[in-house]
């Protein structure tokens, strides 16, 4: 019987790649990409390419309050173009509570 490889440090069985929820954009849905780091000797190790996610506070005039959004750099530019009301409407349409 063949056994699954056990992680050397945690003792857990690695089943799939773990993605933290905080590393994604609420507006565009940008998530980390995965790839390889290649050393000078061409040894390959797995790595993550995280999006440039920033926490930004916007004034929402319709509700008379500030909302804090976790947006990528592209998401911040999108809010600048379409406006904060339309951006929040898109985020809520995806089912995210703000």
Image: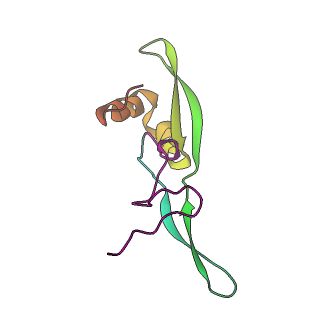
Q: Is residue 83 magenta?
A: no
Number of marks in picture: 0
Q: Is residue 14 magenta?
A: yes
Q: Residue furthest top?
A: 64
User: Which of the image's four quarters has the N terminus?
Assistant: bottom left
User: Which of the image's four quarters has the C terminus?
Assistant: top left
- Location of residue 34 in the rendering, given as x and y in whole percent from the top left corner: 49, 65
- Location of residue 57 in the rendering, given as x and y in whole percent from the top left corner: 57, 27
- Report the predominant secondary structure element of the magenta stretch: loop
Q: Residue at x 41, y 34 (%)?
A: 87
Q: Residue at x 48, y 46 (%)?
A: 24
Question: Considering only vertical position in the picture, is 31 above or below 93?
Answer: below
Q: Residue at x 58, y 50 (%)?
A: 52
Q: Residue furthest right?
A: 40
Left or right of residue 91, residue 68 in this image? right
Q: Nearer the viewer, residue 72 or 86?
A: 72
Left or right of residue 26, residue 76 in this image? right
- Location of residue 7 in the rendering, given as x and y in whole percent from the top left corner: 52, 63
Question: Considering only vertical position in the picture, is 46 above or below 18?
Answer: below
Q: Residue furthest front?
A: 1
Q: Nearer the viewer, residue 60 or 52?
A: 52
Q: What colour scheme was applied to this rendering of the protein?
A: rainbow
Instruction: Determine the image quadrant of residue 3.
Output: bottom left
- Location of residue 67 in the rendering, given as x and y in whole percent from the top left corner: 51, 23
Q: Which residues are magenta?
A: 1-26
């Amino acid at each position: 019987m063949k056994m699954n490889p056990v992680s050397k440090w945690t003792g857990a069985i690695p089943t799939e790649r773990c993605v933290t929820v905080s590393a994604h954009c609420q507006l565009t849905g940008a998530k980390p990409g995965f790839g390889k780091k290649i050393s000078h000797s061409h040894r390959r190790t797995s790595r993550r390419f995280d999006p440039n996610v920033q926490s930004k506070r916007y004034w929402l005039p319709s509700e008379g309050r500030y909302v804090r959004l976790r947006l990528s750099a592209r998401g911040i530019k999108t809010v600048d173009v379409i406006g904060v009301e339309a951006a929040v409407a898109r985020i809520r349409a995806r089912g995210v509570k703000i």
